[in-house]
Amino acid sequence: VKRPVPSSTTSCPHFSSVIGCPGAGGSRISPPFSASLGICTQAERWLPASRTIHVWEAGAAQPQADVLIVSYASLTQHRQQIAAQRFEAIVADESHYLKNHATKRTRAVLTIAAQVPGLRLCLSGAPLPGQPIELVAQLAFLGVLRKHFGGFWSFADRYCAPRQTDQGTFLGAENLDELAQRLRAHCYCRRERAAVLSQLVGEEAQHSDQVV
């Protein structure tokens, strides 16, 4: 969003799952096109009418908008153009798509997120589908990996039981109770499905994986 988002909108259950905002343009990282439409609908519902909202499809010309909704695939393709917009906020929906910190997609998202001085949110129904190492990119996205966990190597050494195996080096897990406590203290908030299902509509109740 080019201009600050009124605080009254942030309490909306759909808002945080819908938007990311830049200083001269807006962006959100998002899932399939159908899910993007649902996000766009909620953004139009909860943001001021003066905001322009655009879903950027892969291969399309760069749009001019306050809020930009873009899939992970499109973001990777248009990384330089999106980064040039200087976001004020960014939201990664279905952020477990960033579980591999070495992929092009994740590197592209982290490059853009690192330039965002304001709000950063990761949204996911399964933030840790495998091992603790899959949290690294999400914590980096939020800007807390180095600040609260000492950076990649400190996190890996403490929580990933590093040892060389045929499958890799950081596929273990240890000190999980401590990790859970630190996540809740610094960046993690859990809401169970039963508590939010009534707030979702249509396909949103089934699936969504986007970034704004």
Image (cartoon, helix red, strand yellow):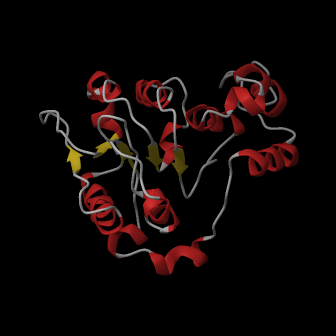
Q: Is residue 211 visible?
A: yes
- Give the total number of marks visible in the rendering: 0
Q: Quadrant of the N terminus?
A: top left
Q: Mark yes or no: residue 165 visible.
A: no
Q: Is residue 149 above or below residue 54?
A: above
Left or right, residue 34 beside residue 109 = left
- Residue 35 in the image: x percent, y percent? 31, 58
The x, y position of residue 184, in whole percent, is 76, 52
In the displayed structure, does residue 122 sit left or right of residue 4? Answer: right
Left or right, residue 53 beside residue 12: left
Residue at the limit of the structure toward the bottom, as seen here: 198
Q: Residue furthest left?
A: 61
Residue 178 occupies quadrant:
top right
Give x and y (percent) for residue 40: 28, 59
Residue visible at 41% across and 24% down in the picture: 104
Compare residues 26 and 158 and report the one nearer the observer.
26
Q: Is residue 192 above or below residue 164?
A: below
Q: Nearer the viewer, residue 82 or 203?
A: 82
Give residue 208's position: percent from left, percent from top: 39, 58
Q: Residue at x 67, y 57 (%)?
A: 189
Reply above or below: 9 against 124: below
* Left or right: 206 in relation to 159: left
Question: Residue at (19%, 42%) from the top-left corner?
Answer: 57
